């Protein structure tokens, strides 16, 4: 029985016969997703190496019989800053107002673009919610301090 060699088979897709109009969508659509996957992969690899080095350091300290410093035992994650909600809320509020003004005043394309100014309400309302959360947390902290 004579089987054909892999080089004897016709190619599934030939780049010479591919329409140039199709190359852009075939490359441009998956490219942002590949970038995101690469960025997430690099972050995961960095976290893995950091944990691995931390564990090796702890192992060396234990092997030498020295006490382990509490800084090494704590999680490497930083504590949430109390000012994050206020800063993030103000930034989102400003971005939302800027988007609304841009779509309302800056676009003279047609009358339908004026309705796109509602898009700015999404980050603006999220920013307002974060600011309200910050105010409520401060109110709760003051009540806890009085007790």
Image (cartoon, rainbow, N blue to C red):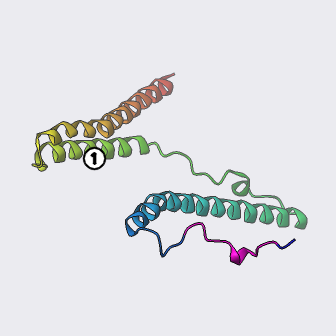
Q: Relative to 14, does residue 74 appear above or below in the rendering?
A: above
Could you tell whether 113 is left or right of 123 in the image? left
Judged by its main secondary structure, the magenta piece is: loop
* Residue nearest the viewer, comparing 20 with 61: 20
Q: Quadrant of residue 63?
A: bottom right
Could you tell whether 62 is left or right of 44 in the image? right
- The residue at the point 59 percent across, 60 percent down is 43
Could you tell whether 8 is left or right of 138 in the image? right
- Residue 8 counted in the magenta span: yes
Q: Relative to 59, does residue 102 appear above or below in the rendering?
A: above
* Residue nearest the viewer, comparing 1 with 144: 1
Q: Relative to 48, does residue 86 appear above or below in the rendering?
A: above
- The residue at the point 37 percent across, 65 percent down is 21
- The residue at the point 84 percent across, 63 percent down is 59
Mark 1 element type? helix
Q: Which residues are magenta?
A: 3-13
**Residue at the spot of label 1:** 95
- Where, quadrant-wise, is the N terminus in this rendering? bottom right
């Amino acid at each position: 029985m004579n089987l054909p060699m892999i080089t004897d088979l016709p190619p599934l897709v030939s780049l010479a016969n591919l329409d140039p109009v199709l190359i852009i969508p075939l490359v441009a659509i998956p490219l942002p997703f590949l970038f995101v996957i690469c960025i997430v992969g690099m972050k995961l690899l960095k976290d893995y190496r950091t944990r691995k080095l931390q564990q090796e350091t702890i192992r060396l300290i234990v092997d030498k019989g020295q006490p382990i410093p509490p800084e090494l035992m704590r999680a490497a994650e930083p504590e949430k800053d109390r000012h994050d909600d206020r800063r993030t809320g103000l930034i989102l509020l400003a971005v939302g107002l800027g988007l609304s003004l841009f779509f309302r005043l800056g676009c003279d394309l047609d009358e339908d673009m004026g309705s796109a100014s509602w898009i700015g309400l999404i980050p603006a309302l999220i920013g307002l919610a974060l600011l309200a959360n910050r105010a409520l947390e401060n109110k709760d902290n003051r009540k806890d301090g009085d007790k």
